Image (spheres, rainbow, N blue to C red):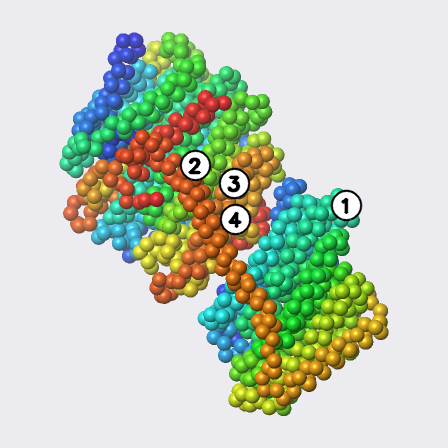
Amino acid sequence: MSPALLLLLPLLSVVVIFFGTKWSGTLSALVSVASVAGSLGVTLALFSTDSSMVAMNWIALGDVLQVDIGLRWDRLARGMMFVVTLVGTLVHVFSLAYMREDEAKARYFGCLSLFMFSMTGIVLADNLVMMFIFWELVGVSSYLLIGHWFTKASAADAAKKAFITNRIGDFGFLIGILMLFGLTGTVSFTGLENWLAGGHAGASAGLLTAAALCLFCGAVGKSAQAPLHVWLPDAMEGPTPVSALIHAATMVAAGVFMLVRVGFLIEASETAGLVIAWVGGFTALLAALMATQQDDIKKILAYSTLSQLGYMVMVVGLGSGEAAMFHLYTHAFFKALLFLGAGAIIYACHHEQNIWKMGGLKTRMPITFAAFGIGTLALIAFPFTSGFFSKEAILDIALHENKLLFLIAAGVAFLTAFYMSRLLVVTFLGAPRSEHAGHAKEVSVIMFVPLLILAFLSVVAGYKPVAELLQAQLPDVHWNWFVFFVSLATMLAGAGLGFLRYLDKRSEPKVIPVLANKFYFDEAYGWAVRNLQDGLAWVVRGLDALFIDGLAVGGITRLTEGVGCLFRRVITGNLQAYSYLFGVGVFVLIYFTVFLR
Amino acid sequence: MPLPLFILFSALTLGFAVAVIANRNPVTAALCLVVSFVGLAALFIGLSAFFIGIVQILVYAGAVMVLFLFIIMLMDIEEEERKHFDRLRTAGGIAVGIGVAFLIGGVLWDFDYGKASLDDVPVQFEAAITLREADADSGIVRSANATAALREGRLKDVALVGEKLFNDYNLHLQMIAVLILIATIGVVTLGKKDSPAPDSGSSGGDKASES
Amino acid sequence: MPAYILELIVVGLGLILLLLESFLPRLGAKGLAAIGSVGLLVVLFLLPSVTGAPSESTGIIWKFYSADSLALFYKGLALITTILVLMMSVVYVPVMQRYLGTGGGVGEYLILPVFTCAGLMWMASANDLTSIFVSLEVVTIGFYIMVAYMRRNVGSLEAGVKYLILGAVSTGFLVYGIAFLFGVTGQTNLDVISTVLGLLEGQDKIILFSFALLLVAFGFKVAAVPFQMWVPDVYQGAPTPTAAFLSVGSKAAGFIVLSRIVDAFLGDHGVQTGDGSYQDQIQRVLLVVAGATILFGSLAAIPQTNFKRLMAYSSISHAGFILLALACAYPVRMDMASGEVVAFYLAAYLPMTMAAFFVLCIVRSSRGEEEISVLDGLGKRSPFLAFVLLVSVMGLAGIPLTVGFLGKLYVFQAALDQGHFVLLAIATLGAAAGFYYYFKVVRSMYWNAPSDQDAIAVGTGSRVLLALLAAAIIFLGLNQGIILGFLR
Amino acid sequence: MIIRRSALVILMCLEIMLSAANLALVAFSRFRLEAGLPDYDGQMLVFFVITVAAAEVAVGLAIVVALFRSRRTIDVTTLTSMSH
């Protein structure tokens, strides 16, 4: 069995769904679920192998450029693959129930399989070009899934926004790849590592930093770091299982994964590391602040995702890819859990997403409540849940590397506890605040089984033996009482404040406009884009008139129609003009060939 | 070919070719073309290409010209109107023509064969006979008739051409057959009329297969 | 089985079809096309089993006919193209009938491509000036008729007249070029000519002159600047299957002959790198023509609104790329010989262009026009057609993971190897302009609102064929080895 | 060809062009003796050119006739229905 199977299974599913079973939603769903479950099985079966293989030689141009379609199956890939396939499988199963009545079920599952294919490609890629291609494919499938309900204007807009924002980042990524290629002459990870090990880096440190930062641009787009974070909250317009799978657990983590893959480059450049760490820390803080004032249950979770991704990026910048991957791994479980839990709630409340119209769901949906509670505990790093271990590692590293970032991280931990307890209290406790919430019922087995599995993992995944078993990356940190107490204190303070403030409230006690309006990012972008667009349009129109119409097209038309301007009056693009031009062409060609040497 | 004759026929060919272009009446133009081609055929014969010369007269003066005239009559085409005639256009056409002619002249100036005369390269009958006999001995088909004529110092052109055509150029002959078939199909379909009335365009097809 | 039997089979097939058409009118267009395609398919499968010239040349035919791997490869291309054109014609029949009046004659339209295909196959094998001329004319005359075929459509007739007259002029130059080449070498076989040219001295002018004349003729056939002006008009006016046939079949045949001729001029005797050798000059001319062709095709395509005109300009620009590959042929430094680059590019060009024209044919037979705007909202009206067109357009633009990308890549690589940086810049500009104008098609399909909502019906046969073409574009793009395998 | 507007006369001009090339070929084949005789390879080509030219004219005339039927004119300057 080879890792290539992991790529083939979802691809097969895509092909089968789009060319075969498109007419039947249920059949397509089964095909898709089978393929992802198969992928999970293959991943588990391949846990003990370690191989890098070249599937085939794709582009071979002498000694200038070699690009192989090659797969890399190391521990990093295995751990990531496990997360992707496991969460993928659970989300697929959950979708079976969640999307039962959707008209375009076949398309939905086809796109999910496409996503699994592309994500697998990113994880297994052994060179930057291949990774970039799958990176783009992920963007496309994400676009399709966010815009699944494309008849809804907001969904279509959100899809477009996600696509365009990601393109900005990808542009940087592409430039980074080209720079690295120019610098080193190779695009494969092994080749780059060897080049660095060869000690060539010293001479071109500046360029290397620039290249690393360009690559980071790609991660900024995909992992929704400030200032390109604006697409992720909007992307919640997609179906909730999609949000769980790609906008919480896997795709947005691809940016972090990529950074860890090229971690050796970041290590080689101190400046790049610092920039990355600060961008991450800043995003974490910003997103956490914004999360405290949101009313939409999915948006709160989206901002929380942003903030946790900020953590990961920060710690990558601080030089510990292991800690980032460890947090990615635990985060995937509890955030998928929270999203699927939110999905269950939304499903039960007839697609109501405003938390102020919920309430009192504790008694009506006890299992969901339990699972959601566990997820929340893990997210706020309650001691001895999985989130606790990974956050502990991050705080520890921040403490050693950069005190200021440690303070920010601690603040974010406090805010996380605060907004999550707010969410929990408002949604589940108190009395129902709307009719839908009052009639909510516990969801079906097929929906809560994935929840329970994820809840279980959210608790145990952090323990070292489990993490070892599941091939996660483990950071090398030691128990630190100071960090433990800081973490505990911030958590308790945040959660306590949240409980006290929101228990039995019927609406937001105090609205802070700046936070509720997400620091006016969207407005600012809107303004900038509008003005920039106008300006740009003006410039482009000018250029168009000058170059395209004036010189290129106009010039050529003029050339074609009238090498002999003499004849413009008579010749208007008819046969005679053509034969005349033919004659002139013959004359010029013969003259040029024979006499002009 | 004696020089005066050569000059006469070349002048005939060139002069009437120009007349084709200069004449406004298509019937006159067609007739000028016939004369020009007769001059050309004479030049061919002067170059000892007797067969080609005869074919030139048969095909062009015979078949093609009749076809042209037939179509002209059929469509009842009158003279081109004078009003569109434009001096600039004429000047441009002539300029391009002269330009290309100059280029060709420039090229030929340096060309060895451009300065040779026919007397420099007489037909070498002895050598030809020897070679042909050797060929015939080794089993290659050679017309005995033509060889005999060569012995008498005559160039039996038709036999030699036929020998070449059916020995070596068999493949091309087949291709030409396909070409004429294509042309026939095409002319027949293009000439079809909507109504079941007799179609006049198909006569072109017959001519094509004739040539 | 000697290779020349193949053409005889194809001609025989054409004759059988002709008889069937007149004696079994019940067969209809579909039946004729089916029989024709199956017959050509059989020939296609016979292709690998034929033999070339025997070691000691017994038959005189091998003087005029070569069956090397390149010739067989192009024969395959011609056969595949013809099969696709036949299929396309079946879809196009309703449009055709509108312009044929009551006189009928659709059947012949399905038979002419078969004969023309024989001509294309002869061209692929022609290695002698006389064979080149005759086979080229077989093809050309077939095209004259197929272009002008819709005898009640002024556009088609107009295109026919333009193509015929300009084509005949180019034929004139071809004969003149052949005459001079024959005059200077006294030979008609290209291999012998190549040797003789190597021995000549002080005849540079006349050699270059004959080359220029031949370049005029073949520049016309492959649509190279400055002999490209007929292309947009003829593509626009001709029936769509014919336009597709022209842009793939005629172009491929033109290029194989041109590459054989260039081979003969630059041939075995190597290139004297010193300035002023006629080989250098030929290379320079080719480079200039290639650059001008790429520039013209790419830039003039930008303002087009008619889909067939757009394809015409795009085909000009692709011709430029192929010429560039041809010009970079000498001295060979690449892993691939330049003949292979040319062949690869043409093989890549085939499925992309055919798919685009095929989709246009289907859309056209449901709507009466061919502006790009008829594609509006195709993504909604027929996602399948839109997808196929998307893939084909992506391929034509040279987006990675399609076969078009690899084709362009090899050309760029060849230019880079030879250090033709100006040409490289022009080619990059052309490729970039390509992205822009192909994007117009995509935008129209997916962004613009459809002008009518009806779904477009696609027959099963067309569906399978289109899916195959799209798959070929992607699959060949992933695995370059397949085409190269056929080449060697 | 550049000057004349009648499609028929243009076809005649094409014939002249081909004939010129033929003359060159015949001349070359006479000057290039092969085995002591004129090189008939060249003359073969002339023969084929004449045939092809005749076929070409036939097709051309058919198109011209069809054009005349639908347009009532064979003036090529009116052939401008397609524009850039």
Confirm whether circles 4 and 2 share one chain.
Answer: yes
- The reply to whether the C-beta atoms of the residues labelled 2 and 3 are less than 8 Å apart is no
Foreground mark, 2 or 1, reads: 1
SS class, disc 1: helix
- Mark 1 belongs to chain: A
Residue A571 coordinates in the image, percent (x, y): 29, 35
Marks 1 and 4 sit apart, C-alpha to C-alpha, by: 37 Å
> Eyeballing the image, is B168 above or below A70?
above
Residue A40: x and y, percent? 67, 70
Residue at the spot of label 3: C427
Q: Which chain carries label 4?
A: C
State how far apart marks 1 and 3 are (Cα): 36 Å
Which residue corresponds to mark 1? A202
Q: Earlier in the sequence, mark 4 or mark 2?
A: 2
Asked where in the image residue A247 lies, by quadrant, the reply is bottom right
Amino acid type, mark 4: Gly
Q: Distance between the residues labelled 2 and 3?
A: 15 Å
Q: Disc 4 versus disc 3: distance between alpha carbons?
A: 12 Å
In the displayed structure image, the side of residue A234 where residue D82 appears, left or right: left
Amino acid type indicated by mark 2: Ala
Q: What residue type is labelled 1?
A: Gly
Relative to residue A406, is residue C472 depicted above or below?
A: above
> Tag 3: residue type?
Ala
Classify mark 2: helix, strand or loop.
loop
Foreground tag (1 vs 4): 1
Q: Mark 2 lies on which chain?
A: C
Which residue in the structure is indicated by mark 4?
A: C398
The chain letter under disc 3 is C
The residue that mark 2 highlights is C224
